[in-house]
């Protein structure tokens, strides 16, 4: 039977901690999972430095290294990988259809673990200067800003973590937040407040990023006073949260009010029997690698039980 005519037991879409944990569990349950890992495989930990809170690594572990290990563990038990992006799904027919560019796969069950993507400020000059001094990834681009002046936008854990990390390279880091209170955890706040290279700019937003081939300054607006101030700097790191990667499933799966996939309160079941969701695409509360991995395990167990419950020849 050709790969395309075969009906897979389970297809896993996405390859972050959730998808790869689902793959490890599904593979060990002899479900021979097929992971469509995407061109930018590995999820958000690929853009992280040291992960200090993943249990089992008292010395910490680099995010990309952790994902290499996740993948190797899934592969060891027989997981197959397709390094392409899914372009279309049809969950309205059974078996379910999952398409990549030029191939269609069929499956009795699907685990969706497509994660989330960094949000942008949505100003025209931000898009124009992306990769020319504007970045959403401190880990990837921090080293380009040795002895430079940069800013980080946001008031959550990500923004503060990135600001602290970027002080390894930059001579000065402005932390620009739209309110006068941070959302970040107390421990992150303490770290950032203690860092002499970080200067906080409160109640402010960026209205424009200036520069020809690379960023040379920004325009700030104080949201309380409406005063505009130009700030000379070399780089802008945007760290204002994430959007779930769920567009592919519009019209087929149920969403919650924040645009994340809706799953049953206990477990990973979506509104369609046989389709499961795990990780950041369905979790806007915890969003941690460990919770994503845990929910991936749940999704694989849910898929395994679902497959046991349907007739062997079910298509
Ligand atoms: P977040 O907690 O949602 O924070 C987003 C921040 O960006 C908020 O301060 C928000 O301002 C600001 N913001 C949102 N939209 C904006 C806009 N259009 N313009 C300007 N500012 C904007 O997101 P996150 O920091 O990425 O964290 C996500 C989750 O991951 C959290 O649960 C966090 O605890 C966790 N996390 C944990 C760690 C760690 O433990 N090491 C590291 C990173 C992230 P407001 O405060 O005004 O809403």
Image (cartoon, rainbow, N blue to C red):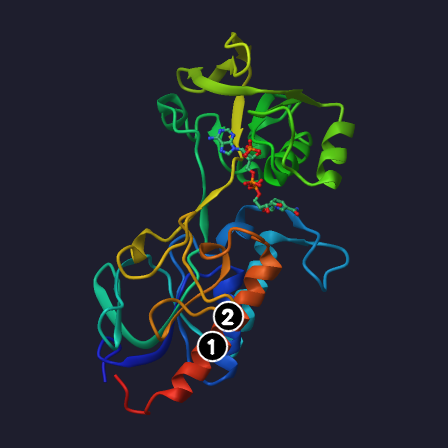
**SS at mark 1 in the image:** helix
Q: Is residue 296 above or below residue 219?
A: below
Q: Position of residue 160 (x, y in %)?
A: 65, 34
Q: Residue at x 67, y 58 (%)?
A: 54
Which residue is identified by label 1? 302
Would you say 25 lies left or right of 117 here?
A: right
Front-lying residue, 85 or 296: 296
User: Residue at coordinates 33% horizontally, 92% vertically from top-left?
Assistant: 312
Q: CA distance from mark 1 to mark 2?
A: 7 Å
In the displayed structure, 52 sits above or below 240; it is below
Q: Which of the two labelled residues, at mark 1 and mark 2, occupies the earlier sequence position? A: 2
Q: How many marks?
A: 2
Indicate the position of residue 77 as horizontal and vertical percent values: 51, 79
Label 2 residue SS: loop
Whether residue 257 is situated above or below residue 69 in the rendered picture: above
Q: Is residue 8 left or right of residue 211?
A: left
Ligand number 1: quarter of image: top right
Identify the residue shown where x is 45% and y is 20%: 214
Is 46 in front, or is 288?
288
Q: Within the image, what quadrant is residue 92 found in? A: bottom left
Residue 63: which numbered mark, if any? Answer: none
Query: Which mark, by number, is residue 267?
Result: 2
At 72% across and 60% down in the image, what residue appears? 57
User: Residue lying farthest bottom?
Assistant: 312
Labels 1, 2: front one: 2
| Quadrant of res 93 | bottom left
Check the picture and name the quadrant holding the N terminus: bottom left
User: In the drawing, does residue 116 fall left or right of residue 231?
Assistant: left
């Amino acid at each position: 039977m050709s790969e395309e005519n075969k009906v897979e037991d389970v297809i896993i879409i996405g390859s972050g901690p959730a998808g790869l944990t689902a793959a490890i569990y599904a593979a060990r349950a002899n479900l021979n999972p097929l992971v469509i890992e995407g061109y930018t495989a590995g999820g958000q930990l690929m853009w992280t430095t040291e992960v200090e809170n993943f249990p089992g690594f008292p010395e910490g572990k680099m995010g990309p290294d952790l994902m290499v290990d996740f993948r190797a563990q899934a592969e060891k038990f027989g997981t197959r990988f397709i390094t392409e992006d899914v372009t279309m799904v049809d969950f309205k027919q059974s078996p379910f259809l999952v398409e990549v560019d030029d191939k269609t796969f069929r499956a009795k069950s699907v685990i969706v673990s497509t994660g989330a993507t960094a949000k942008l400020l949505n100003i025209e000059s931000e898009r124009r200067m992306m990769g020319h001094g504007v970045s959403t990834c401190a880990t990837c681009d921090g080293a380009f800003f040795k002895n430079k002046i940069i800013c980080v936008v946001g008031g959550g854990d990500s923004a503060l973590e990135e600001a602290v990390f970027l002080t390894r390279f930059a001579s000065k880091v402005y932390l620009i937040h739209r309110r006068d209170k941070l959302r970040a955890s107390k421990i992150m706040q303490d770290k950032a407040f203690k860092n002499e290279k970080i200067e906080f700019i409160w109640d402010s937003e960026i209205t424009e990023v200036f520069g020809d081939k690379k960023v040379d300054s920004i325009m700030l607006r104080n949201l309380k006073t409406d005063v505009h101030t130009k700030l000379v700097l070399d780089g802008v790191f945007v760290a204002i949260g994430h959007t779930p990667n769920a567009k592919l499933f519009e019209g087929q799966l149920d969403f919650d009010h924040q645009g994340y996939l809706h799953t049953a309160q206990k477990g990973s079941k979506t509104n369609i029997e046989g389709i499961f969701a795990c990780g950041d695409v369905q979790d806007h509360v915890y969003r941690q690698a460990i919770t994503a991995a845990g929910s991936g395990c749940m999704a694989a167990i849910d898929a395994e039980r679902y497959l046991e419950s349907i007739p062997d020849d079910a298509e």
